[in-house]
Image: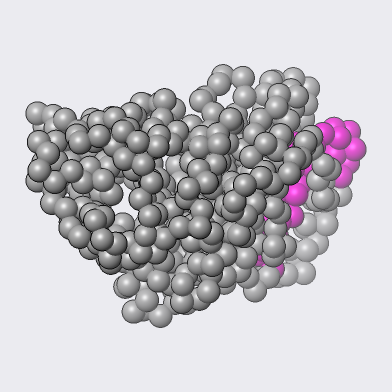
Amino acid sequence: MCESLEPFDEIDRRAFAVHMAKACFGVGMIPLLGTGTQVFGQQGKGGKAKKAIYLFMSGGMTHLDTFDPKPGAETQGSTKAIKTSVSGVQLSEHFPKLAERMNKLSIVRSMTTTQGAHAQGRYLAHTSYPPRATVRHAAMGAWVAKVKGQINKNVPANVVINGGSDHPGAGYMDLKYAPLPIGDPTAGLQNSKLLGGVSEQDFNRRLNLVAKFGNQFLARYPFKEVEGYGAMYAEAIRLMQSEDVKAFDVAQEDSKLRDTYGRGNFGQGCLLARRLLERDVRFVEVQLGGWDTHVDNFETLAEKGPEVDTAVAALLDDLERTGLLSETVVVLTSEFGRSPKINERVGRDHHPAAYSSLIAGAGIKAGYVHGASDDRGHFVDDDEVPVEDFNATIAQALGIPVDQIEYSASKRPFKIANDGVPVDKLFA
């Protein structure tokens, strides 16, 4: 995990020390020192959400076959549109459950991005910055973890479920803000139990020995990155020894509820996200891949659509039932959309010019459609929302000032949504 989330701007003696620290489990298990931050005041609407669930459709989700159908247009293909609980608003036929719950959410049909390749598009969607060779930017979850902090000290503030190795993670921020990665939401928190034959007394004795060596290493290399590894391990041990580790076990849920979410990794990931929010995890991302529909777009949507429809509808209902929806912002987005033109392989190609996202929950309007694409779904026709503005909206919903500045190790200034501006029309 750590290799894919390294926050280095340059390779030097400091970086060498950090690499060495990887070999010292538990090095410097003490709290991190503060990092460079310039804080400004919260502006505009929003700020009601304490937590976030970020559902990322990796691969480029088609907007025409999901949340922005164009019935009658030659670009629509075989996907039909259906009515929703909001008069005049239609969704794709693959989303009947969300159509019934349209009065609980908002759709942004005027999303746009500057990146048309997967890796760059995912990076921009998560960080609000295009990739650079000299710095790794921090993803939204890391920002939330740093600015808002932990509510429950036994659980991480930031978790990613079904994520890929190219996730930006904490970027240039301290490692303690990096997401805890969960590969299989049905497997519980792996490696969280002591090995057979190792007693708790033995485990604590080994930890004390490792900490002794680690503190000596930290005294020689007193860098915050080195401390970061120690803080990360200390947090993992604290979670292992707490009752909150049970939150990661979806098998404890009623079988019927698990069926309601869908038994696939995405459905169970959404259920796990709800369980983690109940234990006061701040930010949970759940990814679903397979949206790169260059071939057989319509066959793929017949499978992907119901999977997402079932899981997200169950999630919204469950959050409402438990009272969590009033304090949580729920987002569903992708790196870009798919082309209106249907190619010779009955697929749709990459399309950054226009796509759609969903947003719901604390302080967000319900039953609202923001913006519009043109009649073919090719370009934004009204109220354009660049990905940076969408991320600024999420930040403002969480009460994070969009003009707050964080500095990298090389003293470069960055903001949570770059120069994005919140879309105030999305707030109730």
In the image, is residue 96 above or below residue 149?
Answer: below
Quarter holding the N terminus is top right
Total numbered circles: 0
Q: Residue at x 34, y 29 (%)?
A: 352
x and y percentages locating residue 284 in the rendered image = 53, 55
Q: Residue at x 29, y 37 (%)?
A: 373
Region in magenta: 215-241
In the image, is residue 403 above or below residue 147?
Answer: above
The reply to whether residue 99 is in sight is no
Magenta run includes residue 239: yes
Q: Main secondary structure of the magenta part?
A: helix
12 sits left or right of 110 in the view: right
Nearer to us in this view, 316 or 176: 316
Q: Residue at x 60, y 59 (%)?
A: 48
In the image, is residue 292 above or below residue 186?
Answer: above
139 sits left or right of 20 in the view: left
Q: Residue at x 9, y 28 (%)?
A: 344
Render colour scheme: one colour
247 sits left or right of 42 in the view: left
Nearer to us in this view, 254 or 412: 412
The reply to whether residue 384 is in sight is yes
In the image, is residue 367 above or below residue 225?
Answer: below
330 sits left or right of 290 in the view: right
x and y percentages locating residue 386 in the rendered image = 45, 33
x and y percentages locating residue 328 in the rendered image = 54, 61
Magenta run includes residue 419: no
Residue 294 sits in quarter: top left
Nearer to us in this view, 130 or 17: 130
Residue 318 sits in quarter: bottom left
Residue 87 sits in quarter: bottom left
x and y percentages locating residue 232 in the rendered image = 70, 49
